[in-house]
Image: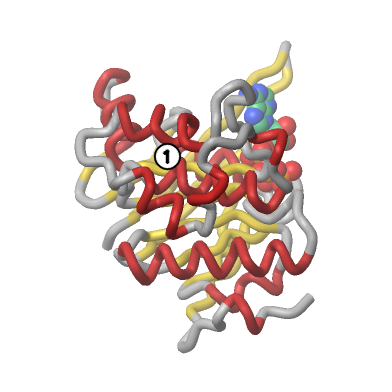
Amino acid sequence: MFIEVTGLKKGYTTGEVRTEVLKGVDLQLEKGEIGVILGPSGSGKSTLVNIIGGVDRSDGGSVMVDGTTVTSLKDVELTEYRRENIGFVFQFYNLVPNLTVGENIEVCANISTAPLDVDQVLASVGLLDKKDRFPRELSGGEQQRVSIARAIVKNPKLLLCDEPTGAVDFETSRSILALLQRINTDFGTTILMITHNTAISGMANTVFRLRSGAVVERVRNKETLPAERIEW
Ligand SMILES: Nc1ncnc2c1ncn2[C@@H]1O[C@H](COP(=O)(O)OP(=O)(O)OP(=O)(O)O)[C@@H](O)[C@H]1O
């Protein structure tokens, strides 16, 4: 199993109030698959994905990714794990405003041990002609494609997407999802994606429904839907 989350727990203490956010989450995903996490606001989706990606720590349980027990890593090892293996895509693109499109991607390529070619990655997201533009000169959908290029230039094993289509319209969403599907096929990248949109679950191999900090439903799709055929 490529991702194996077992009994994962996480809580936060604010003042004197303790909130248990993840109450024993189990989740498995095979290598090269697409997993979708659905769930209401506050159910713990981002917290779960942040722990899998090594940006947050759990209180209990374990996360294994490609044979590495992420939950046992020391801080320095966790940074290396994240840098070498994980690409992140967020709802709001988090591009550096005073760097060009090309430079935004090069920054990530430069800290990776085996990066892909920047121009090749830009071409694969259809933005080679925008390489010298600044993020503010691009549409929302184009900025999201830059942020996807930035995430994949280091050729990550795992791409974690937190509401990647949350800020764009229907047509742009479909093209972003089609791009993610193509990355999954072309590079064999395993993708775990958070969304509010149940229509997107058709493109997943496995759909996990999170409620109040636990996976309450797990659905395996026999066939996955091409993003172009998703409707909502
Ligand atoms: N650093 C933090 N300190 C305190 N509470 C936090 C922290 N991070 C998250 N929480 C709380 O944990 C709960 C789950 O948050 P999380 O962001 O994981 O949910 P989510 O399912 O991704 O929600 P959304 O769909 O709204 O993004 C929320 O109630 C949130 O307020």
Say if residue 213 shows up in the picture: no
Residue at the spot of label 1 = 53
- For this rendering, which residue is in front, 191 or 41? 191
Q: Amino acid at mark 1?
A: Gly
- For this rendering, which residue is in front, 209 or 86? 86
Q: Position of residue 4 (x, y in %)?
A: 34, 55
Q: Is residue 47 left or right of residue 52?
A: right
Q: Is residue 171 above or below residue 104?
A: below
Q: Position of residue 66 (x, y in %)?
A: 24, 52
- For this rendering, which residue is in front, 220 or 105? 105
Question: Is ligand 1 closer than 8 angstroms to the Cβ of mark 1?
Answer: no
x 42%, y 39%: residue: 53
Say if residue 3 shows up in the picture: yes
Q: Quadrant of the C terminus?
A: bottom right
Q: Quadrant of the N terminus?
A: bottom left
- Classify residue 74 by image quadrant: top left
Q: Is residue 33 left or right of residue 92?
A: left
Circle 1 Cα neighbour tier, 10 Å, few/some/many (<14 / 14–19 / ≥20): many
Label 1: element kind: loop
- For this rendering, which residue is in front, 227 or 119? 119
